[in-house]
Image (cartoon, rainbow, N blue to C red):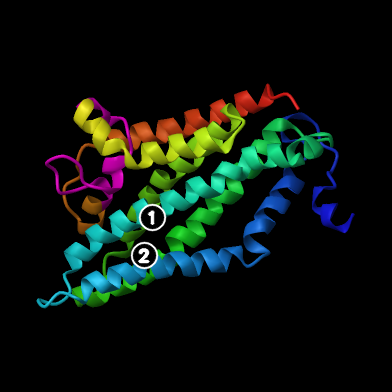
Amino acid sequence: MAGNQAFEMVQSRGWSGGLRNLLRADFGKWFRTRLWWVQGLIWTGVINGILAGVLWSSPEGPDAGTGLMLYSIFSAMFPSIAIVIIMQDAIVGEREAGTAAWVLSKPVSRYAFVISKLLPNLVGVLVCMLLFPGVVAYAQISVAAGQLLDPVRFLAAMGILWIYLSYYLTLTLMLGTLFNHRGPVIGIALGLAFGQQILFGLAPFLLKVLPWTIAMPAGDSDNSIVGAVLRGLPLPDMTPLIVTSISIVVFIAVALWRFEKEEF
């Protein structure tokens, strides 16, 4: 019974029933275990290791502009894979293990269950996949530039990257409520993450709908929204960022609506 103490729910009514205890349990999975610092070390090693190799391998010496562009690309591309892999189990894994049915047999609302899978993972991604490597990248690129980067611009860029990664997190969460097996959840999410350039060739209007150009160049452009913010350049079309932000809200709403109708 000791292993289930985190799920001893406080009586609460309405949509937030049991939310406090569920959040405590799921935040604990990130920050009361080794997960937070292991993930932080992994992503610092991956993103900043590659960035260091690129910055200081050139015979001409480090190029801060290139470093900023690559930081944007690496911070968007690599963590999005991990997010999909982590989030595929947030709903589907709990359902298959029977944990979801057991938890929901307590005085817990279904909204609270979904929110408890959303908020801790959003914070975990922010801390481990953005803040850890972001602080190191700021130092690396400042050294390459020979001066401190504008901290406000860098923080703004990290905030936009969080929106980019939140798109895939909430998309995968929503897919977990729509499908009963991992296959379509991870397949659709990863397919969208890495197949966008193909879609752009088939339907160019998707450049304004999908999140790719928030962090990575596409088509004839050599810039992105994050890249422009980091380098202090004129901002490109902000429509993808607006649509992505709206999509995140829609994904969360669909996940809440669909899980409310789930039968166990």
Residue 114: x %, y % from top left: 64, 37
The N terminus: image quadrant:
bottom right
- Check the image and report above or below for 63 versus 77: below
Q: Position of residue 38 (x, y in %)?
A: 55, 68
60 with respect to 10 (left or right): left
| Residue range of the region highlighted in magenta in the rendering | 203-226
Relative to 230, is 186 on the left or the right? right
Residue at numbered disc 2 = 47
Camera-side residue of 36 and 189:
189
Picture residue at 43% right of the left edge, 50% below the top: 81
Residue 131: x, y in percent?
45, 62
Question: Residue 198's quadrant in the figure?
Answer: top left
- Whether the residues at callouts 2 and 1 have beta carbons within 8 Å, the answer is yes
Residue beneath disc 1: 78
Farthest residue, direction front: 183
Q: Is residue 102 visible?
A: yes
Which quadrant would residue 118 be assigned to in this image? Answer: top right
Cα separation between marks 2 and 1: 8 Å
The foreground one among 166 and 149 is: 166
Residue in the image at 68% along x and 64% along y: 32
Which is nearer the N-term, disc 2 or disc 1?
A: 2
Amino acid type shown at disc 2: Ile
How would you rate the neighbour count of disc 2 (Cα within 10 Å): few for under 14, some for 14-19, many for 20 or more?
A: many
* Residue 204 located within the stretch drawn in magenta: yes
Does the rendering let one see residue 153? no
